[in-house]
Amino acid sequence: MENTTKRYWRGIEELTNDADFVKNIHNEFGSKPSENDYKGESLVDGTSTHRRDFLKVLGFGVAAVSLAACEAPVKNTIPYLNKPEDVEPTIASWYASTFTDGGDYASVLVKTREGRPIKLEVNPSSSLTKGLSARVHASVLSLYDNEKLKGAQVSGKASDWASADKAIIAELGRIAAQGGQIRIVSNTILSPTTKKVIADFITKYPTTKHVTYDANSASGLIQANGGVLPSFDFSKAKTIVSIGADFLGTWLGSDDYAAQWAKGRRVSSAKGGNKEMSRHYQFETIMSMTGGNADYRSAYKPSQEGLVVTSLYNAVAHKLGAAPVSAPSVKIDHLDKAAADLVASKGAALVVSGSNDPEVQKVVVAINALLGSYGVTIDLAASTNYRQGNDAEMASFISEAKAGQIAGVIFYNANPVYNHPLGAELAEALPKVALSISTNDRADETGSLCKYNTPDSHYLESWNDAEPKKGYYSLTQPTISTIFKTRQTQSSLLVWAGLNGDYASYLESNWKTNLLKGGKLAWSNALHDGVFEPAGIASSSAVPAVDLADASAKIAAAYKPSDKLELAIYEKVIMGTGSQANNPWLQECPEPISKACWDNYATVSLATAKKLNFEGEVELDTQEVEVSVNGKSVKLPLLIQPGQANDTIAIAIGYGRTAAGKSANGVGVNAYPFITKVNNTLAFFNTGDVQIKLTGKDRKLARTQTHNTVMAREAVVQETVLAEYQKNVLAGRFRPEITTAEGKKSAMDISIWNGHKYNNHAWGMVIDLNTCTGCSSCIVSCSAENNVAVVGRQEVVNRREMHWMRIDRYYSSDASVDDLKGLEHASEILKLSSSQ
């Protein structure tokens, strides 16, 4: 039966009927900005730069690109005086390639015009990539970032590559002769050929060790599953339970998982169409995009996370007659119902957790084993490679560096001084390292502390490959010559190892020798398709061996719920870990839930704000707060977030850059130093001495949700539940009628053209809002496709954002709810839910 007590609202000011909001409710485009609002017209901080200079301010140049585009990335170039047959002005050429950023992956088609990449689309030949995130779409703009290094540097001064190579090889030889320790530090590397290059480098310098870490670690999940990252198939699950895993937004292969999830949510009224949906439960601390799309959602504090998992295990075990684990129980709404649905869906159920605690993940393994999920919705044989970081090895490296035990280090496209919780300690230790090399594309927080900067080329300028999932391969090929004097890191490692630095030939040789059959033709076909997917790996129903009693005992010891404030640290869907923080398309794209951009902020629930006597924000106006954790403090704006767990504060990573570029530097604060450890792995929460207080300053948040009101129009939000839809496909739909002189008529019957009737909607865009997650990648894609202008933070505050597309976020709650921590939905309009 449909819930008739629900109330729909877009922000706290609408829920509370704030006087200023009510006064302007019929003013669709808001009040005119004051002269002070336009002072300086800066894109970022409102100080001095005119908005029309946005290209210069944001550091994106075009002169070097014009030259690079005239040099085709092939061995034999043709003077453009003699036009190539396959190039026509204004006619696009497409190339298959691969996006990778750490463990983030997508097989893409690159649209180029006259040699310049301008747009990315999904590669239809890939069986893994079914959608592109906002960060993938935005990566084409990062190619043109003028803040990148223009060539090699030694001690902060420009150098030619030959001189830098000679000095580096000499120092590596000296270290090797003395038996000194060398480390290559990287984020997850998906490329098997790059790993082969690293292996060749280690053969040359045997004291080298490769250390991998991830800015958003999954080390605990890997440990619990026997050293591999399982593949998950959400499309085969009738019941999905997620405990803190934002699998539609930021968790592991979220683009792949979102497509799988959507498959289970797609219903049709057509004859023979699917009338069933998967049921999705979300338990979490923050209000995530995945939580906003769930059928049932409940909030918990970080100190309860492990106990939520053990409580779910005991509830499932009780129904299946298995022995319970010994751990304190925790009362969470919908937990018993979730357990009942999981048991009813046995053999087609899936439980996932975003925790990085291996003990928590071991209990999740045990739950899925009880439910028969392995071999159906979980597969260890066809494992994925999206995250490969090892928290313990990274911590050991930093300890060794602090102790002066590391003689040389190469940071391969990794920035741990910024994005690791021990980054400050590493920064202090780097002067003790005799040889320090950064291959990052700019002199960032880590690179600026290194003696040598040997910048890697952008992936659209490079050759490479990837193996995101066991047995699934893809290729990266250059679509433009290098804009600046950069060089692929693989070539650098080969040169330093005394080998031929032609990585393109090395890659082709490796594929022909180890992957392909058919020689040159097979290579050409693979390069054309962009992917190589031989016979899939046979699935396995094997279950990792876990010590359930030991895991539950460690959870009981580590998770102690309290009434104190706790800090949750999370990754935003748009900004991610901050690797592309200098990309203005990402900075200006509103976050799906908060609808804020150009900042991160401290979020608290409405009940917590009332408890702390904080005034609620009204549209863009809020207060500045100081958040301190165990003596470390940051100042940032306050945002009241409905649906968040009470007595918690949440801050996103990916901001607070200091050496990334004009779009990123000084935007937001760095939350990485607040990350702590639980059971020897990084914990993205902190339950220590967490405090929050007002600073007395007012702040403005650049938010887009309430810029345009709905002018009190009714029936903007329409939704129903599956049971009602199965009875009537028009359930929940509002059928508008317009009063005319002849009485009420359907909107379809009214036209300025006599005798003409519109039988259908008079607009061409059709979106299935039941499968749309609100990820906002379409907004960034539209910016790329239509050259939508970036206006900057101040102009967004002034209600002058230029996006052609807008995704509105609406909250729905029972009229009697006060603290709003148990919101079931925060999503777009016209959602269909399987809640019953």
Image (tube, rainbow, N blue to C red):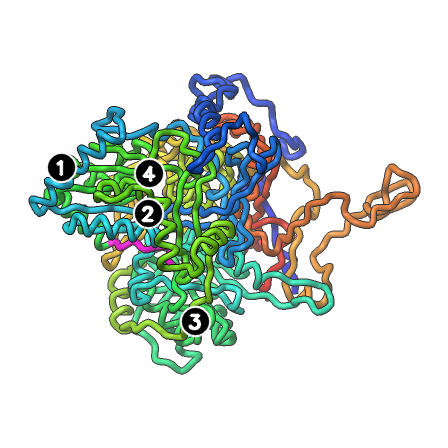
Point out residue 158 in the picture as x, y percentages from the top left corner: 27, 25
Q: Earlier in the sequence, mark 4 or mark 2?
A: 2
Label disc, if present, on residue 215 of the rendered structure: 2
Point out residue 617 in the picture as x, y percentages from the top left corner: 49, 36
Q: Is residue 786 magenta?
A: no
Q: Nearer the viewer, residue 719 or 209?
A: 209
User: What residue would you read off at disc 3?
Assistant: 538
Q: Residue at x 36, y 43 (%)?
A: 653
Marks 3 and 2 in Cβ contact (< 8 Å): no
The residue mark sitting in front, 3 or 2, is: 3
| Secondary structure category for the residue under label 4 | loop
Q: Is residue 389 magenta?
A: yes
The residue mark sitting in front, 1 or 4, is: 1
The span picked out in magenta is: 385-391
User: What residue would you read off at disc 4?
Assistant: 670
Question: Which of the 4 quarters of the picture holds residue 513?
Answer: bottom left
The residue mark sitting in front, 3 or 4, is: 3
User: What residue would you read off at disc 1?
Assistant: 434
- Amino acid type of the residue that numbered disc 1 sits on in the rendered structure: Ala
